[in-house]
């Protein structure tokens, strides 16, 4: 049976179904009542059957597999120039880590009997939701900014989803999408609000731990827009600790682009980046009001983490450096590696610290 939902803020509960609300009546995000995890010692990676991708960890997931391309278990590779390991999240079927959440979100939609899904996105999440909706045989409307990159627009159109281009800010796009949801035009497959999406992104943590012999790094540096990967990683590592599989949490360190840094502002940090003004290079994280901002701040506090702003000059330099090292990624991917350098320069991360950085989207999306 699909898991019911509850609100951790006011305690309200909601029965699972195609008409379930997309957020609590009190305005806060909803979560799954079910929080499954396996008992006992996990198998070493060499003996783990990973042919099912991230669904290898089905025992941790409050959603049953309905829609999948066997996505997941992206490579974890050494990056000596950065003294870190990079997890290549850009090798997913649609070219970004958003496929983690798309497979679980569309599986949830099928579980509930939804006939049509609606999503709002700057591009990557929309392409992922549209692609997995096509895999599920569901209609999809994807609300996007009017100036969305052509490559991302084509990814939505070519799987027969309907892109709805909205003039104005990223927040205007979300508002138009929510109006459609409230009018009953479809089930809200939101990467920002839907808890099923975070059930998928938390598999990032499971994979990192498994690929490292069920040990966690000292720190993970990630970009933050709506915080879908950041919160997913926090939830995944926390679940591993609660299950007794690992004995500690890594520090979770965030990175935001100059001009779009509400989490940094809430922490009292510099929101303008390093000697740089607002940058539009990292279009994937241009979010001024994260849907789960409070939860992101709680995850930072719980892991002795932090968040900093990175400016355009640092992003351009880092992107060039990534490309020259063979990592063909989109501009938003440069945010976390650029932040890693800053964290080390500022002494937040020791020079010999064991660090993992996800590279979140493919450079093919910029063509």
Image (cartoon, rainbow, N blue to C red):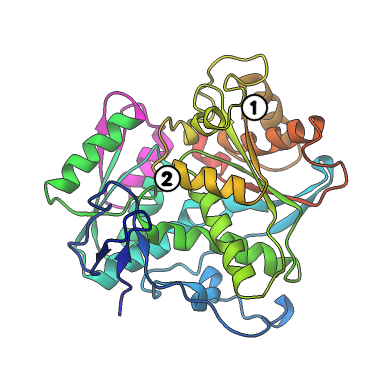
SS type, badge 2: loop
Q: Which residues are magenta?
A: 144-170
Does residue 367 appear in the picture of this structure?
no
Mark toward the start of the polypeptide (1 vs 2): 2
Q: Give the quadrant of residue 272.
A: top right
| Residue 225 spot, x, y in % from top left | 49, 38
Residue at image location 62% in from the left, 81% down from the top: 49
| Residue 337 spot, x, y in % from top left | 70, 38
Other residues around mark 1 within 10 Å, as few (<14) / some (14–19) / many (≥20): many
- Residue 214 sits inside the magenta stretch: no
Residue at image location 33% in from the left, 31% down from the top: 171
| Residue 120 spot, x, y in % from top left | 32, 42
Front-most of residues 52 and 288: 288
Does residue 206 appear in the picture of this structure?
yes
Residue where numbered disc 1 is placed:
315
Tell me, for residue 292, which label it has, or none. Answer: 2
């Amino acid at each position: 049976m699909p898991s019911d939902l509850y609100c951790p803020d006011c305690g309200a509960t909601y029965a699972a179904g195609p008409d379930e609300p997309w957020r609590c009546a009190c305005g806060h995000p909803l979560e799954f009542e079910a929080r499954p995890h396996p008992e006992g010692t996990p198998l070493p990676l060499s003996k783990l059957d990973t042919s099912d991708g991230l669904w290898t960890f089905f025992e941790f997931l409050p959603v049953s597999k309905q829609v999948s391309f066997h996505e997941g278990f992206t490579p974890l590779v050494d990056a000596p120039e950065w003294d870190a390991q990079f997890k290549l999240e850009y090798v997913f079927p649609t070219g970004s880590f958003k496929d983690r959440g798309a497979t679980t979100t569309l599986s949830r939609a099928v579980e509930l009997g939804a006939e049509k899904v609606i999503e709002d996105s700057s591009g990557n999440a929309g392409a992922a939701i549209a692609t997995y909706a096509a895999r599920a045989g569901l209609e999809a409307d994807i609300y996007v900014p009017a100036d969305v990159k052509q490559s991302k627009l084509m990814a939505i159109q070519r799987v027969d989803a309907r892109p709805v281009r909205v003039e104005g800010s990223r927040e205007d796009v979300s508002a138009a999408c929510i109006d459609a949801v409230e009018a009953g035009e479809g089930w809200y497959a939101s990467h920002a609000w839907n808890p099923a999406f975070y059930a998928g992104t938390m598999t990032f943590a499971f994979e990192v731990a498994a690929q490292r012999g069920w040990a966690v790094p000292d720190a993970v540096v990630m970009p933050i827009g709506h915080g879908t990967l950041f919160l997913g990683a926090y939830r995944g590592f926390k679940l591993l600790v609660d299950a007794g599989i690992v004995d500690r949490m890594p520090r979770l360190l965030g990175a935001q682009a100059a001009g779009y840094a509400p989490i940094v502002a809430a922490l009292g940090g510099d929101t303008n980046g390093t000697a740089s003004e607002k940058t539009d290079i990292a279009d994937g994280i241009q979010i001024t009001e994260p849907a789960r901002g409070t939860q992101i701040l709680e995850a930072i506090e719980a892991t002795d983490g932090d968040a900093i702003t990175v400016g355009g000059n640092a992003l351009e330099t880092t992107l060039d450096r990534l490309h020259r090292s063979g990592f063909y990624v989109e501009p938003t991917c440069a945010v976390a590696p650029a932040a890693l350098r800053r964290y080390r320069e500022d002494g937040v991360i020791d020079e010999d610290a064991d660090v993992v950085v996800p590279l979140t989207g493919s450079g093919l999306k910029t063509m």
